[in-house]
Image: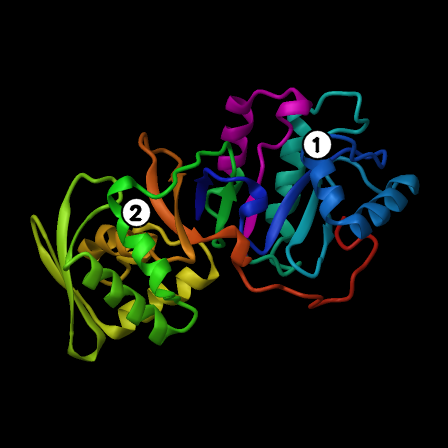
């Protein structure tokens, strides 16, 4: 699954983040410098590897950090020189052939070789889609940032939930927080894009009934539990929210967006002309659970 994610890569809760590097041991500016500041031990190891001339385009180096893992992806040899499209392709081919063996289950990419690398994003994006679109793991490309913010028509509900001190840390509190949101809204809400309205209410046994302008549906407790698991681990799209009942996807996204520990974001799917809304954990909550040192760190873990 490939999705363009309109947030900073450093706000991604994905297990693995991709850092674009050179092969001479310098992380002096841009994305690489930001990774250097976040992971100083990684930079020291990277410098040693480059001093040994062990890193080159087409080779990848995985740092298994205590939070996110960082996949260092060479896009150029010397920092003074531009990137080359063939080096991007070599690295992508290497990633596709070996990511599973390295234990990578979810990953966020920047625009490889663009910016300081001087490559044309129109060319690079086609190449990345070719290699990444059919992978069976979540793959995100952070092509630029859009600060969506909560739509004005949903802000009063969100403020009321904050004042009430609700949370969604457990499944029971998640159900309770949705119930509180519906109470504040008197059961009447609009979708994130404000294009349609819906009514929602809880029945017995945690069954959520939703009535839109064109249809009605119910989400059973197990349906909501599946959405809660997705919500705690990362991005929830319209398809995730409506995985069991398609008609419930858009309304449920609207309900999730007002929860204090969630926020709406914009995503784009390859081949589709219009962006869409999704929701994700707020970055200051850390997103996904820390991966930890599930394997011993190696100086050259992948090459």
Residue nearest the observer in this picture, 202 or 235: 202
Residue drawn at (21%, 59%) of the image: 184
Farthest residue to the bottom: give it.
205
Label 1 sits on residue: 75
Extreme residue toward the right, this view: 52
Q: Is residue 70 visible?
A: yes
> For residue 21: magenta?
no
Q: Which residue is mark 2?
A: 155
Q: Position of residue 76 (x, y in %)?
A: 75, 29
Asked if residue 119 is among those painted magenta in the image, a careful observer would answer yes
**Residue 112, which numbered label?**
none
> In the image, which residues are magenta?
106-130
Query: Could you tell me which secondary element the residue under label 2 belongs to?
Result: helix
Rendering coords of residue 69 (x, y %)? 66, 54
The tag earlier along the polypeptide, 1 or 2, is 1
Q: Is residue 253 left or right of residue 109?
A: left
Expressed as whole percent of the image width and height from the top left, the position of residue 289 reads: 56, 64
Residue 294 at x, y = what percent? 69, 68
């Amino acid at each position: 699954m490939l999705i363009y994610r309109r947030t900073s890569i450093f706000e991604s809760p994905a297990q693995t983040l991709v850092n674009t590097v050179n092969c001479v041991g310098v992380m002096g500016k841009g994305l690489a410098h930001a990774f250097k500041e976040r992971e100083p031990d990684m930079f020291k190891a990277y410098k040693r590897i480059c001093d040994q001339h062990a890193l080159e385009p087409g080779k990848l180096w995985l740092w298994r950090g205590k939070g996110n893992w960082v996949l260092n992806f060479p896009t150029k040899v010397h920092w003074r020189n531009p990137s080359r499209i063939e080096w991007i392709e070599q690295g992508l081919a290497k990633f596709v052939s070996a990511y599973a063996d390295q234990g990578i289950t979810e990953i966020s990419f920047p625009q490889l070789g663009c910016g300081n690398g001087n490559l044309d994003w129109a060319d690079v994006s086609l190449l990345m889609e070719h290699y990444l679109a059919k992978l069976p793991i979540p793959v995100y490309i952070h092509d630029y940032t859009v600060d969506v913010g909560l739509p004005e028509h949903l802000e009063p509900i969100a403020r009321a939930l904050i004042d009430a001190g609700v949370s969604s840390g457990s499944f029971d509190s998640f159900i309770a927080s949705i119930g509180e949101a519906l109470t504040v809204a008197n059961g009447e809400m609009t979708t994130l894009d404000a294009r349609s309205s819906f009514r929602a209410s809880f029945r017995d046994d945690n069954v959520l009934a939703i009535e839109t302008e064109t249809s009605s549906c119910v989400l059973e407790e197990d349906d909501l539990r599946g959405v809660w698991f997705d919500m705690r681990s990362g991005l929830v799209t319209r398809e995730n929210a409506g995985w069991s009942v398609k008609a419930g996807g858009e309304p449920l996204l609207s309900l999730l967006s007002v929860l204090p520990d969630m926020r709406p974001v914009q995503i784009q799917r390859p081949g589709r002309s219009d962006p869409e809304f999704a929701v994700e954990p707020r970055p200051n909550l850390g997103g996904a659970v820390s991966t930890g040192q599930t394997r011993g760190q190696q100086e050259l873990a992948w090459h």
